[in-house]
Image (cartoon, rainbow, N blue to C red):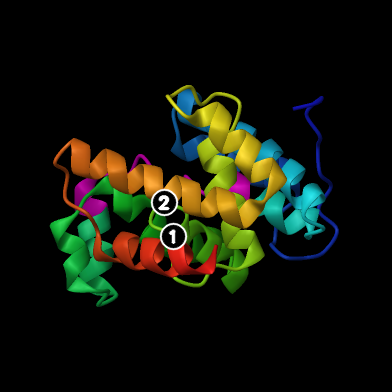
Protein backbone atom coordinates (compact mmCIF):
# COMPACT_ATOMS: atom_id res chain seq x y z
CA UNK A 1 0.00 0.00 0.00
CA UNK A 2 1.00 3.59 -0.44
CA UNK A 3 1.40 6.04 2.44
CA UNK A 4 -1.15 5.63 5.21
CA UNK A 5 -4.16 7.82 4.68
CA UNK A 6 -5.95 9.52 7.53
CA UNK A 7 -9.65 9.84 6.92
CA UNK A 8 -11.55 12.79 8.33
CA UNK A 9 -15.03 11.68 9.29
CA UNK A 10 -17.59 13.96 7.67
CA UNK A 11 -20.68 11.78 7.16
CA UNK A 12 -21.89 11.62 10.78
CA UNK A 13 -21.99 7.84 10.64
CA UNK A 14 -20.72 7.57 14.21
CA UNK A 15 -20.50 9.95 17.20
CA UNK A 16 -16.70 10.26 17.07
CA UNK A 17 -13.85 11.83 15.17
CA UNK A 18 -11.33 9.36 13.76
CA UNK A 19 -8.89 10.25 16.55
CA UNK A 20 -11.53 9.50 19.17
CA UNK A 21 -12.46 6.18 17.58
CA UNK A 22 -8.81 5.17 17.29
CA UNK A 23 -8.49 5.84 21.01
CA UNK A 24 -11.56 3.74 21.82
CA UNK A 25 -10.22 0.80 19.81
CA UNK A 26 -6.71 1.14 21.26
CA UNK A 27 -8.10 0.98 24.83
CA UNK A 28 -9.48 -2.52 24.21
CA UNK A 29 -6.53 -4.17 22.43
CA UNK A 30 -2.87 -4.92 22.90
CA UNK A 31 -0.50 -3.13 20.55
CA UNK A 32 -0.09 -6.01 18.10
CA UNK A 33 -3.85 -6.35 17.57
CA UNK A 34 -4.31 -2.58 17.47
CA UNK A 35 -1.68 -2.22 14.74
CA UNK A 36 -3.49 -4.93 12.78
CA UNK A 37 -6.71 -2.90 13.00
CA UNK A 38 -4.91 0.18 11.66
CA UNK A 39 -3.58 -1.85 8.73
CA UNK A 40 -7.04 -3.26 8.01
CA UNK A 41 -8.42 0.29 8.07
CA UNK A 42 -5.87 1.29 5.41
CA UNK A 43 -6.49 -1.84 3.34
CA UNK A 44 -10.24 -1.20 3.50
CA UNK A 45 -9.69 2.35 2.23
CA UNK A 46 -7.71 0.98 -0.70
CA UNK A 47 -10.33 -1.64 -1.57
CA UNK A 48 -13.13 0.93 -1.24
CA UNK A 49 -11.41 3.19 -3.74
CA UNK A 50 -10.84 0.30 -6.14
CA UNK A 51 -14.52 -0.64 -5.95
CA UNK A 52 -16.06 2.86 -5.90
CA UNK A 53 -17.40 2.39 -2.39
CA UNK A 54 -17.83 4.90 0.47
CA UNK A 55 -14.26 5.30 1.76
CA UNK A 56 -15.26 6.69 5.16
CA UNK A 57 -17.65 3.85 5.94
CA UNK A 58 -15.08 1.26 4.85
CA UNK A 59 -12.40 2.91 7.00
CA UNK A 60 -14.62 2.89 10.11
CA UNK A 61 -15.65 -0.75 9.66
CA UNK A 62 -12.06 -1.81 9.02
CA UNK A 63 -10.83 -0.05 12.14
CA UNK A 64 -13.62 -1.54 14.28
CA UNK A 65 -13.61 -5.12 12.98
CA UNK A 66 -11.55 -6.61 15.87
CA UNK A 67 -12.83 -4.28 18.62
CA UNK A 68 -13.97 -7.26 20.72
CA UNK A 69 -11.16 -9.67 19.80
CA UNK A 70 -9.55 -9.75 23.24
CA UNK A 71 -12.62 -10.06 25.44
CA UNK A 72 -12.93 -13.01 27.78
CA UNK A 73 -14.99 -16.06 26.90
CA UNK A 74 -17.14 -15.21 29.92
CA UNK A 75 -17.99 -11.78 28.44
CA UNK A 76 -18.97 -13.30 25.09
CA UNK A 77 -21.06 -16.06 26.65
CA UNK A 78 -22.89 -13.50 28.81
CA UNK A 79 -23.83 -11.44 25.74
CA UNK A 80 -24.95 -14.53 23.81
CA UNK A 81 -27.20 -15.53 26.69
CA UNK A 82 -28.42 -12.06 27.68
CA UNK A 83 -29.32 -11.12 24.11
CA UNK A 84 -30.74 -14.57 23.32
CA UNK A 85 -28.47 -14.97 20.33
CA UNK A 86 -28.30 -18.27 18.44
CA UNK A 87 -27.35 -20.89 21.08
CA UNK A 88 -25.26 -22.71 18.45
CA UNK A 89 -22.71 -19.95 19.04
CA UNK A 90 -21.95 -21.43 22.45
CA UNK A 91 -20.36 -24.44 20.73
CA UNK A 92 -17.67 -22.24 19.21
CA UNK A 93 -15.15 -19.73 20.49
CA UNK A 94 -13.42 -16.41 20.01
CA UNK A 95 -12.57 -16.99 16.34
CA UNK A 96 -16.30 -16.82 15.59
CA UNK A 97 -17.50 -14.72 18.52
CA UNK A 98 -15.32 -11.65 18.06
CA UNK A 99 -17.17 -10.87 14.83
CA UNK A 100 -20.68 -12.25 15.25
CA UNK A 101 -21.00 -11.22 18.90
CA UNK A 102 -18.45 -8.42 18.77
CA UNK A 103 -20.88 -6.12 17.00
CA UNK A 104 -23.02 -6.15 20.17
CA UNK A 105 -20.11 -4.69 22.18
CA UNK A 106 -19.74 -1.96 19.56
CA UNK A 107 -23.43 -1.07 19.86
CA UNK A 108 -23.53 -1.16 23.64
CA UNK A 109 -20.19 0.47 24.45
CA UNK A 110 -19.63 2.84 21.54
CA UNK A 111 -23.25 3.68 20.69
CA UNK A 112 -22.64 2.91 17.02
CA UNK A 113 -25.82 1.73 15.35
CA UNK A 114 -25.08 1.86 11.63
CA UNK A 115 -26.24 -1.62 10.58
CA UNK A 116 -23.99 -1.76 7.52
CA UNK A 117 -20.93 -1.19 9.68
CA UNK A 118 -22.16 -3.61 12.35
CA UNK A 119 -22.91 -6.29 9.77
CA UNK A 120 -19.46 -5.93 8.25
CA UNK A 121 -18.02 -6.63 11.72
CA UNK A 122 -20.41 -9.56 12.24
CA UNK A 123 -19.57 -11.13 8.89
CA UNK A 124 -15.81 -10.67 8.80
CA UNK A 125 -15.26 -13.97 10.63
CA UNK A 126 -17.70 -16.31 8.86
CA UNK A 127 -18.98 -14.43 5.83
CA UNK A 128 -22.60 -14.77 4.76
CA UNK A 129 -24.51 -16.14 1.77
CA UNK A 130 -25.24 -12.53 0.78
CA UNK A 131 -22.57 -9.96 1.56
CA UNK A 132 -22.81 -6.26 0.83
CA UNK A 133 -19.88 -4.51 -0.80
CA UNK A 134 -18.82 -3.26 2.64
CA UNK A 135 -18.97 -6.80 4.05
CA UNK A 136 -16.74 -7.97 1.21
CA UNK A 137 -14.26 -5.13 1.68
CA UNK A 138 -13.78 -5.75 5.40
CA UNK A 139 -13.71 -9.55 4.97
CA UNK A 140 -10.89 -9.22 2.43
CA UNK A 141 -9.05 -6.30 4.05
CA UNK A 142 -8.68 -8.39 7.20
CA UNK A 143 -7.34 -11.31 5.15
CA UNK A 144 -4.84 -9.52 2.90
CA UNK A 145 -3.60 -6.57 4.99
CA UNK A 146 0.18 -6.08 4.62
CA UNK A 147 1.02 -7.74 7.95
CA UNK A 148 -0.44 -11.05 6.83
CA UNK A 149 2.10 -13.69 5.85
CA UNK A 150 0.75 -17.16 5.12
CA UNK A 151 0.84 -19.54 2.15
CA UNK A 152 -1.45 -18.18 -0.55
CA UNK A 153 -1.72 -14.61 0.72
CA UNK A 154 -0.04 -13.14 -2.36
CA UNK A 155 -2.49 -15.02 -4.58
CA UNK A 156 -5.35 -13.76 -2.39
CA UNK A 157 -4.13 -10.18 -2.81
CA UNK A 158 -3.85 -10.48 -6.56
CA UNK A 159 -7.30 -12.05 -6.94
CA UNK A 160 -8.92 -9.50 -4.61
CA UNK A 161 -7.47 -6.48 -6.39
CA UNK A 162 -8.66 -7.90 -9.71
CA UNK A 163 -12.12 -8.96 -8.53
CA UNK A 164 -13.41 -8.44 -4.98
CA UNK A 165 -16.08 -11.15 -5.23
CA UNK A 166 -13.55 -13.73 -6.41
CA UNK A 167 -11.41 -12.76 -3.44
CA UNK A 168 -14.30 -13.51 -1.10
CA UNK A 169 -14.74 -16.96 -2.57
CA UNK A 170 -11.00 -17.65 -2.50
CA UNK A 171 -10.76 -16.75 1.19
CA UNK A 172 -13.81 -18.83 2.09
CA UNK A 173 -12.44 -21.81 0.17
CA UNK A 174 -9.02 -21.51 1.83
CA UNK A 175 -10.55 -21.13 5.29
CA UNK A 176 -12.67 -24.25 4.86
CA UNK A 177 -9.69 -26.17 3.55
CA UNK A 178 -7.62 -25.11 6.57
CA UNK A 179 -10.36 -26.07 9.04
CA UNK A 180 -10.75 -29.51 7.46
CA UNK A 181 -7.00 -30.14 7.33
CA UNK A 182 -6.56 -29.16 10.98
CA UNK A 183 -9.68 -31.08 12.08
CA UNK A 184 -11.32 -27.95 13.51
CA UNK A 185 -15.08 -27.59 13.89
CA UNK A 186 -16.73 -25.63 11.11
CA UNK A 187 -19.35 -23.03 11.97
CA UNK A 188 -22.42 -23.84 9.82
CA UNK A 189 -22.58 -20.34 8.34
CA UNK A 190 -19.10 -20.83 6.86
CA UNK A 191 -20.34 -23.78 4.79
CA UNK A 192 -23.45 -21.84 3.76
CA UNK A 193 -21.21 -18.95 2.70
CA UNK A 194 -19.02 -21.26 0.64
CA UNK A 195 -21.98 -22.85 -1.15
CA UNK A 196 -23.56 -19.50 -1.96
CA UNK A 197 -20.37 -17.90 -3.24
CA UNK A 198 -19.29 -20.99 -5.17
CA UNK A 199 -22.40 -20.68 -7.29
CA UNK A 200 -22.08 -16.90 -7.57
CA UNK A 201 -18.60 -16.82 -9.09
User: Seen in the image, is 106 located left or right of residue 159?
Assistant: left
- Give the mark nearest the N terminus, 1 or 2: 1
Query: Is 152 above or below relative to 142?
Result: above
- In this view of the protein, which residue sits in the foreground, 152 or 41? 152
Q: Where is residue 171 drawn, in percent x and y?
A: 46, 46
Q: Secondary structure at mark 2?
A: helix
Q: Where is residue 168 drawn, in percent x and y?
A: 53, 53
- In this view of the protein, which residue sits in the foreground, 163 or 17? 163
The mark found on residue 112 in the picture is: none
Q: Quadrant of the C terminus?
A: bottom right
Q: Secondary structure at mark 1?
A: loop
Alpha carbons under labels 1 and 2: distance apart: 8 Å
Q: Nearer the viewer, mark 1 or mark 2?
A: 2
Q: Residue at x 31, y 54 (%)?
A: 97
Answer with the quarter of the image where residue 175 lies.
Answer: top left
User: Which residue matches tag 2?
Assistant: 172
User: Which residue matches tag 1?
Assistant: 127
Provide the residue span drawn in magenta: 61-75
Q: Residue at x 57, y 27 (%)?
A: 154
Q: Are marks 1 and 2 in contact (CB under 8 Å)?
A: yes
Q: Residue at x 48, y 47 (%)?
A: 170
What is the residue that sits farthest to the bottom in this orientation? 84
Query: Is 34 above or below relative to 78?
Result: above
Amino acid sequence: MENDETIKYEENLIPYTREQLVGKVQEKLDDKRFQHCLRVEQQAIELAKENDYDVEKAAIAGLLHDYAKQRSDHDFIKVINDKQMNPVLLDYGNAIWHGVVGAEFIKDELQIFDEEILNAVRRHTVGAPYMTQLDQIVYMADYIEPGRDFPGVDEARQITHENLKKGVFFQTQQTLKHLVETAKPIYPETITTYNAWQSAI
